[in-house]
Amino acid sequence: MPKATLTFELPEDHLEFKWATNGAKYLTVLQDLYNELRSRSKHHAPETTWGDAYDLFRDTLNENGIDPWEEG
């Protein structure tokens, strides 16, 4: 069975390490946003404003424990 190993030079590569180790969380956020927007579109929900979209984005990040502005 094939295996892969990722190597990081810490602390220099701390952001790359964070992104690699949290990849599943980031994918979950994208899937949740996609599904919610698709559902709103499919069911002809009232037009979503930029404020609504921002709130949805922020809430989805928070629900998945992601702070995109966190440095480490």
Image: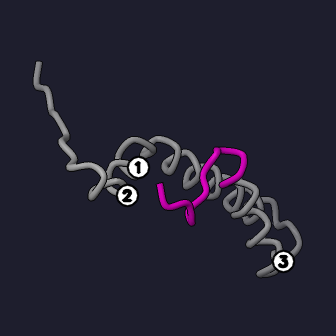
- Name the residue carrying label 3: 47
Closer to us: 49 or 61: 61
* Disc 3 to disc 2: CB gap under 8 Å: no
Checking the image for residue 15, the label placed there is: 2
**In the rendered image of this protein, does residue 54 appear above or below residue 2?**
below
Whole-angstrom CA distance, mark 3 to mark 2, is 36 Å
Residue at 56% in and 50% down: 31
Residue type for callout 2: Leu
Whole-angstrom CA distance, mark 3 to mark 1, is 35 Å
Closer to the observer: label 3 or label 2? Answer: 2
Asked which quadrant contains residue 16, the reply is bottom left
Residue type for callout 1: Lys
- Marked residue nearer the N-terminal end (3 or 2): 2
* Span shown in magenta: 61-72
Closer to us: 3 or 65: 65
* Disc 1 to disc 2: CB gap under 8 Å: yes
User: Overall secondary structure of the magenta stretch?
Assistant: loop
Residue type for callout 3: Glu
